[in-house]
Amino acid sequence: MLKMYLSDFMRYRYLLYNLISRDFKLKYRRSLLGVAWSVLNPLLMCTVMFVIFGSLMPQFRGSGIENYAVYLVIGQLLFNFFRDSTTMAMSSIMNNAMLLRKVYIPKYIFPLQKICFGLVNCLFSFIALVLVMLFTGAPLYWTALLAVYPLLMLALFSLGVGMILSALTVFFRDVMHLWEVFTTILMWFSAIFYAPEQFGNAILVQLIELNPIYQYITAFRTLVMDGQLLSGGQVLVCAVWALVMLTAGVLVFKKTQDSFVLYM
């Protein structure tokens, strides 16, 4: 199965590139700020959340967060990447229904393209992280170069989720509405603007730690903010979650894709 997908990927890699390029151009078409909005948007959101949770509600900051602005923007950027890319992947099959009826294209190309497009946007948004770190005087550790690992693992995890969502949406349109509610709940369990330890509730902390998005965000913060290498457990958790979800996504997608044309 893996060999077949790799063969298709090599054959249609130029199509994937063109689809990503098309989405990129469409997103910033007639935009005065253009690509700069990918940097400005997280900066503005970070400012708003910093004012609310850092100043008006200081109890959210906790005592163990040295640089709350950097802590906040990392959580925001990674969670937004997961939410936005999976949301786009969810409707990718339905949005290309007419094309799929006319020509043969491997159907997984479309959720894959949305995840790749989300990753490109996320990389541009990391400029905002660099600016926040420079503005707040945060130290730049060499371990930040290794942050590509949790980011890529998150991308693979998102791809698995996106493939499952795109398949389910073909049969059940309500998935789109339920996913919006679910990601809102997930955001509050991802420790984006708070430190889980500050609640002093062991059960709540354990529930948060079961959230794979929290694990990816924490691994990224460990490398960028703390300047520490990931522990063996962190490396393993990131890889296992990505592998499990990607495998599940491939299996669900492969099992259902032949029936797509009957419901699109």
Image (cartoon, rainbow, N blue to C red):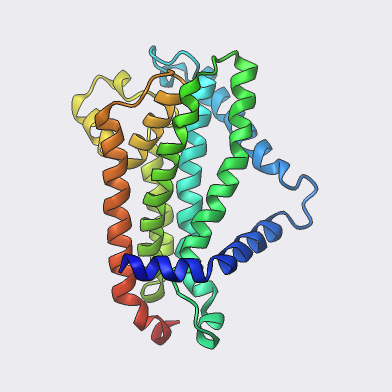
Q: Position of residue 245 (x, y in %)?
A: 30, 54
Q: Is residue 203 left or right of residue 60?
A: left
Q: Position of residue 262 (x, y in %)?
A: 39, 87
Q: Position of residue 227 (x, y in %)?
A: 44, 18
Q: Quadrant of the N terminus?
A: bottom left
In the picture shown, does residue 37 fall above or below 71?
A: below
In the picture shown, does residue 177 fall above or below 229?
A: below
Q: Quadrant of the C terminus?
A: bottom left
Residue at 45%, 63% in the rendered image: 90
Splitting the image into 4 quarters, where does residue 24 fall? Answer: bottom right
Splitting the image into 4 quarters, where does residue 33 fall? Answer: top right
Choose between 110 and 169: the one closer to the eye.
110
Name of the residue lying farthest toward the left? 203
Q: Is residue 221 left or right of residue 51?
A: left
Q: Is residue 124 left or right of residue 157?
A: right
Choose between 20 and 68: the one closer to the eye.
20
Residue at 54%, 85% in the rendered image: 103
Residue at 50%, 43% in the rendered image: 80
Q: Position of residue 28 (x, y in %)?
A: 72, 54
Residue 91 visible here: no
Residue at 39%, 68% in the rendered image: 5
In the picture shown, does residue 168 fall above or below 199?
A: below
Residue 140 visible here: yes
Total number of numbered discs in the rendering = 0
Choose between 104 and 29: the one closer to the eye.
104
